[in-house]
Amino acid sequence: MYHKAFYKFVLSVLSLPIFLYAVIKFFFSAKRKNFYANNSEISEIEQALHQKYKYLSQQKSSTQIHKEALKIFKAQSSNTSSKNIEQAHFSTYFENVLFHKFIMIKVILALPMFILLTFYLQPLVRYIFERIVMAVIVIIGVIVSVFTILYFSPLDAAYSILGQNATKAQIHQFNVLHHLNEPYFIQLWDTIKGVFTFDLGTTYKGNEVVTKAVGERIPITIIVAVLALMVALIIAIPIGIISAMKRNSWLDITLMIIALIGLSIPSFWQGLLFILAFSLKLDILPPSYMPEHPISLILPVLVIGTSIAASITRMTRSSVLEVMRSDYVLTAYAKGLSTTQVVIKHILKNAIIPIVTLVGLLVAELLGGSAVTEQVFNINGIGRYIVQKQLIPDIPAVMGGVVYISIVISLANLIIDIFYALIDPKLRSEINERK
């Protein structure tokens, strides 16, 4: 375990409380004076002195015998430096604390260490734990980056909201009200603390509670993204497999041309075409999103889904073609299995691994790049909210939107990493080898 610098550091930090407890007890407790009496060597010396004075019929008090035993013990230990004696005594005392005393305190202080060891000894659990730690680090990095960019932005929130005719007194009052007059690091710390406690204050304009505003807008963005991803997978995977199985045929060429066109069309223009076709011409779908009518989600879901389906189709085709060249696929055909059986049992199971990786990358694109589609279809989602607020700049609102999107993306990628570890035998083997 100690070859891992991170775990060594964490274990050292977690073990620090019980070590400090032992140090304080050893140096400042009154029991330290009586500790030497518990030492086996001193006890043996005292017993020998008792027998000696009993044989000589001499009366000695316990205190006198104890002092004489300490002197004899120190004389016997004179060849050892005083520092080493002190270290030996503390080591013995620390061992005594660990194994014999203060059971409940030790359980409380050592519980985090046992939890860490439990994580470390289970390869898959350790893998998940490391990914969670990485996600937290990424989130903190996003907070610092976004806050720094907004802090040093040439735009002034006070002038943007109060107007160019605002007096210096009004601007100063605005800055004091929103703590904009405080130093950079104090504002940064307040922002980091606010993100993890779900308290980013209120927006500069409109006086909205940031967490409430983000909480009202982020669900619809996630719903659209999930539905669009499902549509993309339903469309792209079968088309990619068919295109690979019919390699270099007219069908393959046609499907790849369509996929290339799908990659080339901007989403906002595709959205306008869909509105023109399905809303204005055919009049079968509403042109904009209406919360009371779930059917109004069809157009934005189709626009986003078809735009990312092109990428998944191309990846599926190339992945299936690579797997089809494998020896085990040729062996499966030689055994007399049908094409459908080979595709389902052998090809798709191994070709899905790169597709999962691509889906993980597309999650960030779906959530982070949703602003254009939300603007076209009048969806009051988080992407549109961030774009509107960054023009002020409304730092709490932008921070809330960007950071909580990054949290959702980190959680989504964590789920994908776990799924990836479950379906990829090579990665699973590497995880188990680290045990």
Image (cartoon, grey):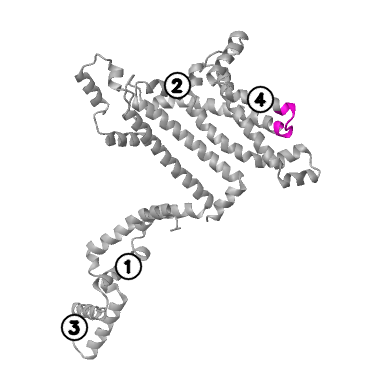
Amino acid type for the residue under numbered disc 1? Ser
Q: Residue at x 41, y 37 (%)?
A: 139
Cα–Cα gap, marks 2 and 4: 32 Å
Q: Are marks 2 and 4 in contact (CB under 8 Å)?
A: no
- 236 vs 115: above or below: above
Q: Quadrant of residue 294?
A: top right
Q: Is residue 199 visible?
A: no
Cα–Cα gap, marks 3 and 2: 90 Å
Cα–Cα gap, marks 2 and 1: 62 Å
- Count of number-bearing discs: 4
Q: Residue 133, image x and y in percent?
A: 44, 44
Residue 304: numbered disc: none
Q: Which residue is mark 3?
A: 60
Give the main secondary structure, helix, strand or loop, of the magenta stretch.
helix
Question: Magenta span has 245?
Answer: yes
Q: Which residue is mark 4?
A: 257
The secondary structure type at the circle numbered 1 is helix
Amino acid type for the residue under numbered disc 3? Lys
2 or 1: tag closer to the N-terminus: 1
Q: Nearer the viewer, mark 4 or mark 1?
A: 4
Q: Are marks 4 and 1 in contact (CB under 8 Å)?
A: no
Q: Which residue is mark 2?
A: 384
Cα–Cα gap, marks 4 and 1: 74 Å
The secondary structure type at the circle numbered 3 is loop
Cα–Cα gap, marks 1 and 3: 32 Å
- For label 3, count other residues whose C-alpha is less than 10 Å away and answer few (under 14), some (14-19) or many (20+): few
Q: Is residue 192 left or right of residue 353?
A: left
